[in-house]
Image (tube, helix red, strand yellow):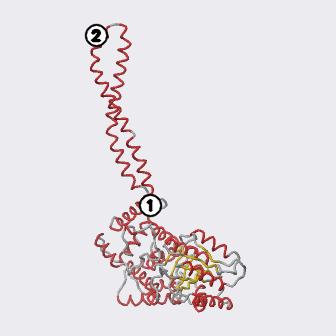
Amino acid sequence: MVFNWFRRQKSSERATPPQEEQLTANPSPEAEPAAVVSAEEPLPDSAQQNWAEEAYKHIQQQSSQAQAGDETLLAPPETSAPIPEQTLAENELVAPVTDQVDIPSASEPSATAPLSFLARAEADRQTRLERLKATAVEVAPVVTPRADTVVTSVPLVEVPGLAFDEGFLWSAEILAAQGRRPEDVSIEEITWLKKLRQGLDKTRRNIVNQLKAIVGQGPLNQAAVMEIEALLLQADVGVEATDSIINTLQSKLREEVLAPDAAIAYLKKILRDMLDRPLQQSRNPIFAPEKDTLNIWVITGVNGAGKTTTIGKIAHIAQKSGYQCLIGAADTFRAAAVEQVKIWAQRSGIEVIANPGKNTDPAAVVFDAIAAAQSRGTELLLVDTAGRLQNKKNLMDELSKIRRIVDKKAPNAKVESLLVLDATLGQNGLRQAEVFAEAAQLSGVVLTKLDGTAKGGVALAVVQQLGLPIRFIGAGEGIEDLRPFSSYEFVEALLSS
């Protein structure tokens, strides 16, 4: 079964109807803000715990289907092997007993001396039969429990690499709050949420601990708001985004006094609304390649931001989601850039269009890649470009040329231009995004290396100052460590304890 990462339900707003159905099935009266608050507390024995257990059992059944066949084939010999022995033992007991009835006739010759040996052998035989009978009576009842234990132990086998721990409970609660059903949860989603939470651990420890100390002093007041402002600036949220958040908080405080839990829940809502604001103005709120149509995604960014690695990961996601993918290696400046993208493509079984020459024209490679994609019926073409600084005008003009080639060669294609930003750069990446937005007509941002920084708040700065939506987020070096962005999951991973 193909799991489509691009089409997975991840918006809390679109999840309202399924969530209402789930609330009727699981008696949990909390709405979304209450579910957010409960994520920061130890899970009690409630509907959330039951939901997580049901999801884990469903994942168990999916992952153990291949092993279940082997176990059922091996289980009958274990239960049936003792049974023939017992039946044989009982048959032996029945047959000799009939012979034993005739034995009293031998009591007359037993008085003679030559028959003493035979009598002694017959007595030994009788004692062995009695011992066998005694053991047969004791073992026979044990056969039924052994068969029961084999049947009940199969669904209790743990999923390899996925423990039912605190990380699973948190991930399950995040999915349940978005209206997901236990039978719809996949192991890929649980694994990604655990990685995302672990990747944002540095930022979360800096923010959450101080934030809880601030709101734990009592109802939120103006002094506490000023402390939150300093905290957001330390997390590299940016001045403009911080001002917007603080102004919204102050407006809320003029209406009512917020308790600590309500203050954190309201802060999460502000951050989610800020991250989702560009999607309301975007022509493509759901960022996914269209089936049976050529989609061209041009990946840009400065040197070392992770463009080639991001292309390999996006190609892997597209392949797993059922799209026909192709990569155009237009990074003809950096040494071994083509070889690197080929290695990433081999991991997903995707073909690469490249020019064997050195220092060739990147626009020519893009032209050939588009022609190959059109002839092969490719659904997603990923174009790798050379890393360049935003102050190099000649290289930025070359990026504009690539975009003109794409628009001219594939006028009916769905074109997206994504900027890869290194989260460890913080505010320094904003100037890069401003210049690239002019040259490449950016339509989104890919935020990488969030697992190596304590300034994950740069995501808010990018959205607020540039008005660009975040399309993908990376929290690791593995091929599975980049996924489509979800504001709800990001904020929960950022602010949950």
Q: Amino acid at mark 1?
A: Ser
Quick check: 440 left or right of 38?
right
In terms of secondary structure, where does tag 2 sit? loop
Q: Is residue 47 left or right of residue 450?
A: left
Q: Residue at x 59, y 77 (%)?
A: 327
Q: Position of residue 144 (x, y in %)?
A: 33, 43
Disc with the residue nearer the chain's start (2 vs 1)? 1
Coordinates of residue 193 in the picture (x, y in percent): 47, 71
Closer to the camera in the image, 484 or 391: 484
Which residue is depicted at the point 40% across and 72% down? Answer: 175
Q: Which mark is residue 108?
A: 2
Res 114 quadrant in image: top left
Count neighbours of disc 1 (C-alpha within 10 A) and say few if under 14, some if 14 to 19, many if 20 or more: some
In the foreground, 172 or 103? 103
Q: Amino acid at mark 2?
A: Glu
Q: Nearer the viewer, residue 156 or 347?
A: 347
Q: Quadrant of residue 451?
A: bottom right
Residue 361 at least partly seen: yes
Image quarter where the N terminus lies is bottom left
Disc 1 designates what residue? 63
Furthest-right residue in view? 358
**On the rendered image, what quadrant is the C terminus found in?**
bottom left
Of residues 260 and 328, which is closer to you in this image?
328
Residue 374 lies, with reference to residue 345, above or below; the image says below
C-alpha gap between disc 2 and disc 1: 72 Å
